[in-house]
């Protein structure tokens, strides 16, 4: 009987455990630092769990070449079939975001847990503090029990309070491995000289990200004005592209506040009606009256991003060059890394959870 351990009972870890539970030749032990499984998954997608997207393409990720290879083995249809085989029904919205039909995130966790059976033992509230190898076997926390294979699926500290981030995944220091420093992705922007009077304002806008006056990203969506910066799905997507820039100096956002109106002459409208109240949010109207600006090119200088505690995912992690096509570490046979452990991050819309599930499926296929 092959002994396999999975570090982390999040989306990738649970999916890997579910796949391994179908085999008769393995026993699986899962180490989970929290008192319950799938903590982030339960809260994902605004509590609805946006698990997939019908339009998974390489350019949605930071490493297109790596994702192309992933999609050769596991694409949207592959994952959808896997979930259907578990009894999980899904629905897709008009933008291709796929959710459980219940629109209730814990449904996904419950379905995965229900599939595990007796061959999977989840050890809750048991953080992994060390990972060492001896005689071709692996040992967790200096325990006597030896494992034939280890799947690292403990994710990243994205969304965690600063205190809990300290020492997260510290066990990686026990092995020789190349990583990229973690940074917040899918988070809001802190804006330089931010007009705080806009706090609480929500508008639909076309958002463009520029670096050294070169267009990097453009997309329409809702923008939310916070106390010191801006957020919203379109902003989170812009942050993913910003995060990939080597040089982040002289970056700014341009907001077209009339994204679906190409006809209105703003100056003429103001002269005719005495204000912009009929076409602009009241708080933006007040700001415009004090400091007029171009409604189709409202520039905001980027100070930086919100921290990891505010991020949905992190960029960085174990370099893809360290991995074989089946997510095994080249320098450590028997050791695998999946999900957010790997330096792969995508935009909003189910792309990151897709990668978590796809990497788990591929890693377990030949274990």
Image (spheres, helix red, strand yellow):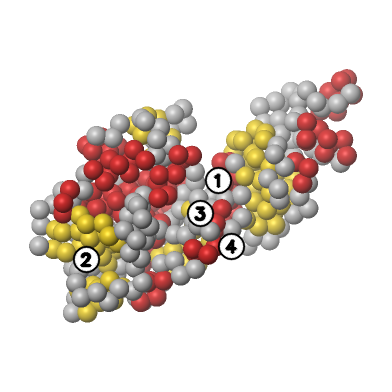
Q: Name the quarter where the N terminus is drawn.
A: bottom left
Read off the residue under disc 4: 246
Read off the residue under disc 3: 159
Q: Are marks 4 and 1 in contact (CB under 8 Å)?
A: no
Can you tell which of label 1 and label 2 is closer to the viewer?
A: 2
- Residue 34 numbered mark, or none: none
Examine the rendered structure and indicate whether residue 98 appears above or below residue 190.
above
Q: Name the quarter where the C terminus is drawn.
A: bottom left
Can you tell which of label 2 and label 3 is closer to the viewer?
A: 3
Q: Earlier in the sequence, mark 1 or mark 2?
A: 2
Residue appearing at x 62%, y 44% in the figure: 231
Is residue 9 shown left or right of residue 235?
A: left
Q: Earlier in the sequence, mark 4 or mark 1?
A: 1
Q: Are marks 3 and 1 in contact (CB under 8 Å)?
A: no
* Label 3 residue SS: loop
Determine which quarter of the picture holds residue 198: top right
* Label 4 residue SS: loop
Question: Where does residue 99 sit, x and y in percent of width and height?
Answer: 39, 35
- Residue 237 numbered mark, or none: 1
Q: Earlier in the sequence, mark 3 or mark 1?
A: 3
How far apart marks 2 and 3 lie (CA) works out to: 29 Å
* Label 1 residue SS: helix
- The answer to which of 265 and 159 lies nearer the viewer is 159
Instruction: Residue 213: tell me if it is visible.
Output: no
Residue appearing at x 28%, y 49% in the figure: 15
């Amino acid at each position: 009987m092959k002994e396999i351990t999975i570090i982390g009972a999040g989306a990738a870890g649970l999916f890997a455990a579910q796949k391994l539970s179908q085999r008769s030749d393995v026993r699986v032990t899962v180490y989970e630092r929290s008192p319950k499984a799938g903590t982030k998954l339960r809260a994902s997608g605004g509590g609805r769990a946006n698990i997939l997207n019908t339009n998974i393409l390489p350019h949605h990720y930071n490493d297109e070449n790596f994702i192309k290879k992933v999609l050769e083995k596991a694409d949207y249809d592959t994952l959808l079939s896997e979930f259907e085989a578990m009894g999980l029904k899904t629905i897709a919205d008009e933008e291709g975001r796929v959710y459980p039909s219940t629109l209730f995130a814990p449904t996904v966790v419950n379905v995965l847990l229900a599939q595990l059976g007796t061959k999977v033992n989840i050890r809750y509230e048991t953080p992994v503090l060390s990972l060492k190898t001896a005689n071709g076997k692996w040992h967790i926390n200096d325990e006597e029990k030896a494992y034939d294979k280890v799947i690292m699926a403990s994710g990243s500290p994205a969304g965690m309070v600063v205190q809990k981030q300290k020492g997260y995944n510290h066990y990686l220091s026990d092995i020789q491995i190349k990583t990229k420093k973690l940074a917040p992705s899918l988070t809001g922007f802190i804006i330089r000289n931010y007009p705080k009077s806009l706090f609480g304002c929500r508008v639909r806008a076309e958002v463009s990200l520029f670096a050294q006056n070169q267009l990097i990203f453009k997309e329409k969506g809702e923008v939310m004005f916070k106390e010191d910066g801006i957020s919203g799905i379109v902003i989170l997507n812009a942050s993913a592209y910003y995060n990939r820039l080597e040089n982040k100096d002289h970056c700014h956002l341009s907001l077209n506040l009339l994204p679906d109106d190409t006809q209105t002459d703003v100056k003429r409208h103001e002269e005719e009606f005495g204000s912009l109240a009929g076409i602009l949010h009241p708080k933006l109207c007040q700001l415009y009256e004090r400091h007029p600006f171009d409604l189709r090119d409202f520039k905001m200088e980027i100070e930086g991003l919100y921290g990891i505690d505010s991020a949905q995912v992190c960029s960085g992690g174990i370099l893809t060059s360290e991995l074989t096509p089946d997510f095994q570490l080249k320098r450590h046979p028997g050791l695998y890394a999946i999900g957010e452990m790997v330096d792969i991050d995508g935009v909003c819309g189910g792309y990151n959870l897709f990668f978590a599930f796809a990497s788990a499926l591929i890693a377990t296929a030949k274990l």
